[in-house]
Amino acid sequence: MSRLSKGFFLLGLSCSLPAYGGTDSLTFDEWYEEFRREAVDSGVSAQTLDIAFAEQKLIPFVITRDRKQPELRKDFQSYIDNAINVLRVRKAKRMLAENKALLDDIYKKYGVPPAYLVAFWAMETDFGNSKGDYPIIGALSTLAYDTRRPDFFRSELMHAVKMVQSGVLPDKMKGSWAGAFGNFQFMPSTYHAFAVDYDGDGIADLWNSLPDALASAANYLSTEGWDKSIGWGGEAFLPKRFDWDLIERQKTLREWRELGVEFSANGTPLSTPAKLFLPAGIQGPAFLVYSNFDVILQWNNSVLYAIAIGHLADRIQGFPPFKKKYASGKTLTLEDSIEIQELLAKMKLYDGKTDGILGRKSREAVRKFQNLYDLPADGYAGPSLLHFMRLVLNGGAERKNLSFDEVRELQTILSKGSYYKGPVDGKMGKSTQKAIELYKKVYGLQDREINRKLLTKMRLQAARGMENGEQDPAVKEFWKQEEELRRQELKKLNKIKKLKKKLKAKSKNKKHGAGRTGKKVQNRLDSQSVSRYSA
């Protein structure tokens, strides 16, 4: 039995470990011998392997964490509020001031501004206070032996072993359950590619040497293409009528401004290319982002993370908070996200991984689906979209007859936007239909039928600009015409009443004839004075 096996099994763990579902049904001992041969063939010495694995053990909790389905993910506002608060900004400014000379020196060499390095440091480990306490070799061995992502973690384990060969002591290699470590949570492969021995002591120590850690992070960002002449982007505000197909399209800041998008350039040249991002769909905020935003995504492929990094860096530099706060809303679980990818794949719109990570490829597929069903193509996958996709695959998205409650919901949406001023009674009357036609005209909808498909669109658009419906020229003109028609009807009604009164006065001596004439007048009155605002 190898020294590795002794190290593991002295702790009382069975060598077969069936609960982990080991790779290709190998026992762990068999798996390790295979890994050991591969490591030796790649240049790792047997002595290094003995040192690396001598005190390690499999960690069952790592498997539990890796397989645990997370609860609902944070919505945009909750994420930003959690990541950026007054105390964190204050501490970040203090850390920048305390390390100013070092950060300025690193900036001169790598071109990454100090505020961004401090923002990454804050987000990754709370300025080094949460680096992780799991043995890296043990955690990666556990994950590499497991069947979920064995190739990825096997590669990372190989890099970790080579770190030991380069002089890093395994008992100092502590980090997260997933194998990330140090002040900036590098993975072993990232360490080998970008770690810098900035303090010149012979070892790139990302745990205890702040110069090494900061320089390594700067080296990573610089190598990935950081442009020191610009920032990351910023908050933007869209005009009411906007072409959603422009989301994630690149245009210059000048071109975006010509399209009616409002933003603060903060000194960035208007010739700078920028892409439009809507991290929470049309209900949420909008951002114009520059090429450095893509560099942040290379570090962590999360749009919310990238926005948080950029905004925290701005706050450190003295820029104000976002102008607008957004209400928290329902989000998707990991299982929901995987289901969306599976449904998109079933519809031949998506051919990527079904991993629940809704990245660029998933967003593009969502936009294709939204365009197919005439929905605002914002690329955002939320609970409403998932519900609609289920309806589509179950044949329910095209059902035409709305229920009583759905008509009431439709009337409520129209009322909030000042398109409808009648009763919310669930009846599809003439004024409700006219209000729908007005709404369709304002929003450029081509739907011919009043059905669930149209209602879904109205739900999705209700969160943006509905309260300002009365300010729309088309809505103003509509109600102006309606008011004029109402005045004409009242005028006609008064005229008929006067005529009726006159006829009654003349019919005192002609009771039967007058009765017939009065009845005719009454019929005319009834036919012409029906309220135009009935539902």
Image: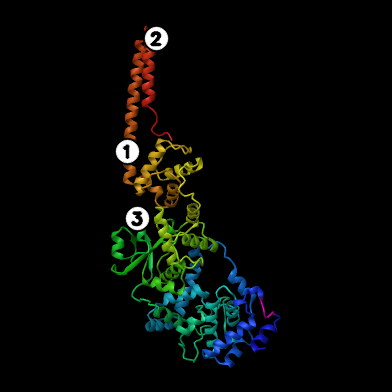
Q: Please state the horizontal and vertical placement of residue 501, each as a whole percent of the image.
A: 36, 16
Image quarter in which the N terminus is found: bottom right
Image quarter in which the C terminus is found: top left
Q: Along the polypeptide, which appears first: circle 1 or circle 2?
A: 1
Q: At 53% from the left edge and 83% from the top edge, which residue is drawn?
A: 207
Three-letter residue code for mark 1: Lys
Residue that numbered label 1 is attached to: 480
Q: Which residues lie in the magenta part?
A: 13-17
Kindly report the distance in space between the C-alpha atoms of the residues bearing marks 1 and 2.
44 Å
Q: Along the polypeptide, which appears first: circle 3 or circle 2?
A: 3
Does residue 267 appear in this view?
no
Residue 262 position by quadrant = bottom left
Left or right position of 13 against 386: right
> Nearer the observer, disc 3 or disc 1?
3
Q: Please state the horizontal and vertical placement of residue 224, each as a whole percent of the image.
A: 40, 78
**Tags 3 and 1 in contact by the CB under 8 Å rule?**
no
Is 347 in front, or is 72? 347
Residue 319 position (above or below residue 448):
below
Main secondary-structure element of the magenta-colored stretch? loop
Residue that numbered label 3 is attached to: 242
